[in-house]
Amino acid sequence: MFRIGHGYDVHKLVEGRKLILGGVDIPHTTGLLGHSDADVLVHAVMDAMLGALALGDIGHLFPDNDDNYKGADSMKLLAEVVGVCRENGYAIGNIDATVIAQAPKLAPHIVTMRENIAKVCGCDVSQISVKATTEEKLGFTGEKLGISAHAVALMTKIN
């Protein structure tokens, strides 16, 4: 049995924060603002996984008004989501994600992002797709005000 979920997340770019995407600390002049490390890619992936199983979203599991998650490493939160999915009898079939950012160039970091996500999810890197695109200087991402990400997860029933 298969279940499909979609996830979306967005965070504002600000000075004085690290830019972390897919668990990779990317050198840049600005970083993403959020209660946790604001890893917009991993947040979209988690929401896709949870959505596939009708288990709500990451705000339900990790509320932004809970100090336990202040500055949290999103890769550790992803590990918890993987555990919740397994408890509900599902594992990752595959994930396809897209990061929308005008800058910086993400191509040099894509392989590491895929490897990081696959390792935490306990699957082969071939099951994780991460892509990056710009919005041709249009909208908030094009104006370098923020970064967004979409993800689709195919979850498969564990026998």
Image (tube, rainbow, N blue to C red):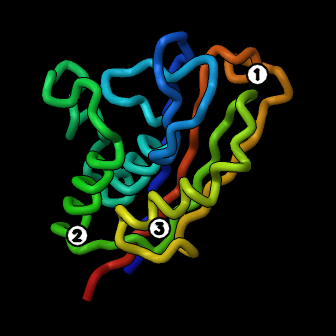
- Disc 1 secondary structure class: helix
In the rendered structure, find residue 154 and report the number of the disc placed on it: 3
State the residue in front, 142 or 88. Answer: 142
Q: Residues within 10 Å of mark 1 (few under 14, many from 20)?
A: some
Q: Which image quarter is the C terminus in?
A: bottom left
Q: Residue 86 carries which label?
A: 2
Using the image, determine if residue 159 lies above or below residue 17: below
The answer for how far apart the CA atoms under marks 2 and 3 are is 14 Å
Q: Which residue lies furthest to the bottom in this view?
A: 159
Disc 2: CA contacts within 10 A as few (<14), some (14-19) or many (>=20): some
Amino acid type of the residue that numbered disc 1 sits on in the rendered structure? Gly
Question: Quick one: label 1 or label 2, which is nearer the N terminus?
Answer: 2
Asked if the residue under mark 2 is in contact with the one under mark 1, i.e. CB atoms within 8 Å, the reply is no
CB under 8 Å between discs 2 and 3? no
In the rendered image, the quadrant that contains the N terminus is: bottom left
Q: Is residue 103 above or below residue 105?
A: above
Residue 152, image x, y percentages: 53, 56
Q: Which of marks 1 and 3 is nearer the N terminus?
A: 1
* Crowd class of label 3 (few under 14; some 14 to 19; many from 20; radius 10 Å): many
Residue at 45% x, 18% y is 33
Which amino acid type is marked by label 3? Answer: Leu
Please identify, in this view, whether the residue under mark 2 or under mark 3 is nearer the observer: 2
Mark 1 sits on what residue? 142
- The image shows residue 124, relative to residue 59, as above or below, that is below
Mark toward the start of the polypeptide (2 vs 3)? 2
Question: Is 114 situated above or below 159?
Answer: above
Q: Position of residue 63 (x, y in %)?
A: 21, 28
Closer-to-camera residue (119/62): 119
C-alpha distance separating marks 1 and 2? 37 Å
